Image: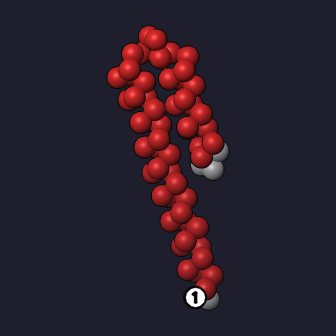
Amino acid sequence: MYPLIVFLPLLGSSIADFFGRFLGSEGTAIITTTCISFLRYSLFFIFMKSHRQLVLAISE
């Protein structure tokens, strides 16, 4: 899950760069927004996982 932090924005920008002419402005906007949205949700789950471990370590 941690490599997603690097590769999702890279994937979105690469697709927008290489296939932007074929996808058009709306297609590239959808692709990049989707990649950033998945990144946002994965960061939320990574944060919650680390926060839960921190709370458990403090309470012990």
Q: Badge 1: few (under 14), some or many (20 or more) residues near its Cα, within 10 Å?
A: few
Residue 44 higher or lower than 10, as above or below? below
Dot 1 corresponds to which residue? 59
Q: Which image quadrant: the C terminus?
A: bottom right
Name the spot of residue 36 as percent of width and height, x first: 47, 41
Determine the residue located farthest toward the left in the rendered image: 26
Write down the quadrant of residue 51 in the picture: bottom right
Q: Position of residue 23 (x, y in %)?
A: 41, 15
Question: Where 34 falls versus 17 (above or below)?
Answer: below
Q: Is residue 2 left or right of residue 34?
A: right
Task: Give the structural element (helix, strand or loop) at label 1.
Answer: helix
Task: Decide which of 3, 10 is in the foreground and name it.
Answer: 10
Type of residue at label 1?
Answer: Ser
Q: What is the total number of numbered labels drawn onto the structure image?
A: 1
Asked which colour scheme the image uses, the reply is secondary structure
Q: Quadrant of residue 57?
A: bottom right
Q: Position of residue 10 (x, y in %)?
A: 60, 34
Q: Residue at x 45, y 51 (%)?
A: 41
Give the farthest residue toward the front. 25
Question: How far across and how far down the image is residue 14, in percent?
Answer: 57, 25
User: Outermost residue toward the top?
Assistant: 22
